[in-house]
Image (cartoon, rainbow, N blue to C red):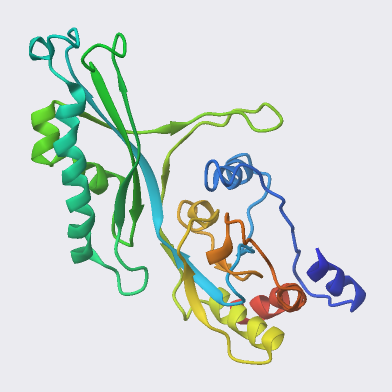
Amino acid sequence: MYGAKIIKDLAIEGDWQLWLTGTVLEEDCDGLCWQYLINEKVLRPDVVVITEPTNLGVYRGQRGRMEIEVRAPGRSAHGAHPELGENAVYRMAPVIAAIERLNQDLAAGADPFLGKGSVTISHVRSTSPSLCAVADSCTIHVDRRLTRGETEESAVLQVEALESVARAGARVTVLDYARPSFTGLVYPTRKYYPAWVMEESHPAVRAAARAAAQALDAPPRLGKWGFSTNGVATCGMFGIPTVGFGPGDEVHAHTPDDQCPVAHLTRAARFYAAFPGLFLAEARP
């Protein structure tokens, strides 16, 4: 907003419009807000600037992510006679170990810019008729980070191909998101958020580098996010040129030490005021 105010105060005019979006649900479902804006024809910008923390660097990409559920069935029996049942937790144990190994194997597909994909188990749960009975199901929640070239289909096939998954008779499912926003609106989507990368030669990246150089009085650092942003929708799903520039460092995000230097705020405002005109200059033939 202060970047926009600078534009107003200095009467920086041009053949462009600047829209500011205060979007919701990003923490819960990356990019869902932008799916709504674009699918419902609210807004279709020529370029998007994500203002998540970049430590005042120009960011041009991020890994994608997806959420996978693996469920192994079992057969309940009284806890006094476990041999009469089939414990789903024991069936799942080799699957858990195999997914840990899979994370190491993903290093072979590392992208020069985004790095390797990754996979980890974030939640384990089981069911049984009671706490003195053999578990009749076990489910794990898998957080899969996707590097360039990896897709929803390839990631699911990797898990389904694990020998331990077949032995456990487990089912692999990509999860869906369908929870209400603060307005009560439910806008369902699949929990698959693709990776995206902007090349350094793209006009959006060149304009961002020029704007950052002006704001910092020094050549900017080009990089990428380690976490996920709404860019998974704007660029990953819809192909809209997207760059990032924001105050603060992502290493502090969601920690008790979350912080943002005041000097970052003033330099970021300078960047946002300069970017529209510079992008127009870079994008025109």
Name of the residue lying farthest toward the front: 80
Task: Report whether 171 appears left or right of 176.
Answer: left
- The percent coordinates of residue 264 (x first, y second) are 71, 75
Instruction: Say which quarter of the image contains residue 72.
Output: top left
Placement of 16 over or under 106, stated as above or below? below
Instruction: Say which quarter of the image contains residue 191.
Output: top left
Quadrant of image for the N terminus: bottom right
Task: Report whether 105 appears left or right of 179.
Answer: left
- The percent coordinates of residue 193 (x first, y second) are 43, 48
**Number of marks in the rendered image:** 0
Q: Which of 118 and 137 lies nearest the eye of the viewer?
A: 137
Q: Residue at x 52, y 42 (%)?
A: 29
Placement of 241 over or under 217, stated as above or below? above
Q: Residue at x 77, y 76 (%)?
A: 266
Placement of 54 over or under 187, stated as above or below? below
- The percent coordinates of residue 232 (x first, y second) are 48, 54
Name of the residue lying farthest toward the right: 9
Residue 258 visible, this orientation: yes
Task: Report whether 177 appears left or right of 2.
Answer: left
Placement of 127 over or under 198, stated as above or below? above
Residue 242 visible, this orientation: no
Q: Residue at x 54, y 76 (%)?
A: 205
Q: Which of 197 and 11 lies nearest the eye of the viewer?
A: 197
- The percent coordinates of residue 77 (x first, y second) are 17, 8
Q: Which of 94 and 284 lies nearest the eye of the viewer?
A: 94
Q: Residue at x 22, y 64 (%)?
A: 107
